[in-house]
Image: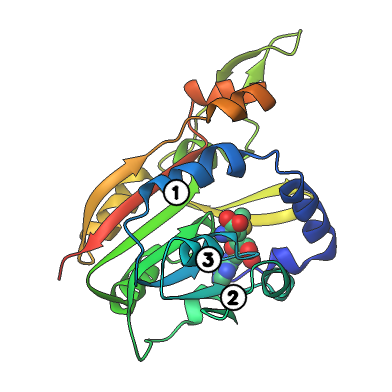
Amino acid sequence: MKQNIYDNPTFFEGYMKLRDSKMTYNDFLEQPAMKDALPDLKGKRVMDLGCGTGGLSKYCIEMGASAVVGVDISEKMISRALVENNDENIKYVCSPIEDLSYPIEPFDLIVSSLAIHYIEDYESLIRKLHTLLNPNGILIYSIEHPVVTARKDMRNWWKNENGERLHWALDHYREEGKREQHWYVDGVIKYHRTLQTLVNGLIGHGFMLERMLEPLSTKEGLNLMPDLKNEERRPSFLIIKSRKTD
Ligand SMILES: C[S@@+](CC[C@H](N)C(=O)[O-])C[C@H]1O[C@@H](n2cnc3c(N)ncnc32)[C@H](O)[C@@H]1O
């Protein structure tokens, strides 16, 4: 099932307010690590899957990419991308990732920031991404970490009567599939997968692992958002960089 929750007006308003605050886990954890994992982008053709408002697409152009195709299921996100991160070398396409077809010219790099945990069929996705890449092409994606997506009710921090965090509860790890949560609205659907499914799905479809990251906060983040110190106790995000081998 493809869900387009970002076009829900209540969700969109809440999400954009959060992102516009520039005080998010994306700003201090996920984006710095994604950028650190990027290869030399000079002259590269890049696809940005689940591009949202296009921040990463634009960054790739600024770093020298020759062309970027940003793909997102949400019309609202693509509309913002066209206003905030427009560039003559970026083409924004409003489409579900699942419906992408083989391009005339394949890509050197596919990036995807926090979108793949919304995709139900991981194996088909990786197979498709393999066809979209040039030989030796690179795929870098970030997702919510499996230790975050595993537990079904997603109430993970156990706290004492003073509200202090005692420990992080991990459960239902092996039970892969749909997770439903309240995030601005009820019924936001994500998909939990084990680490071995994520990694073997890549290896089994012609990719070689190059790097994995479980990012910690930047210094600035720790100063501005002290809760980010809890990333030492469990990671929020997982970033996997792999290369097409055959
Ligand atoms: C957490 S946001 C991240 C946006 C952007 N990558 C960023 O880091 O700012 C996830 C994005 O994935 C998009 N998305 C979710 N499911 C999708 C699908 N099936 N096909 C294309 N985009 C999808 C959403 O519309 C949303 O823009």
Q: Mark 3 is on which residue type?
A: Ser
Q: Position of residue 180 (x, y in %)?
A: 65, 51
Q: Earlier in the sequence, mark 1 or mark 3?
A: 1
User: Going from the N terminus, do you reach mark 3 or mark 2 first?
Assistant: 3
Q: Residue furthest bottom?
A: 104
Q: Quadrant of the N terminus?
A: bottom right
Three-letter code for the amino acid on which mark 2 is drawn = Asp
**Left or right relative to 86: residue 38:** left
Q: Are marks 3 and 2 in contact (CB under 8 Å)?
A: yes
Q: Residue 176 vs residue 115: left or right?
A: left
Q: Position of residue 241 (x, y in %)?
A: 32, 52
Image disc number at residue 87: 2
User: Looking at the image, which residue is at 38% across and 87% down?
Assistant: 103
Q: Amino acid at mark 1?
A: Met
Q: Which residue is mark 1?
A: 34
Check the image and tell me how it is coloured: rainbow
Within-10-Å neighbours for mark 3: few <14, some 14–19, many 20+: many
Identify which residue is drawn at 67% across, 70% down.
81
Residue 116 percent coordinates (x, y): 49, 59
Residue behind mark 3:
57
Q: Is residue 188 left or right of residue 234?
A: right
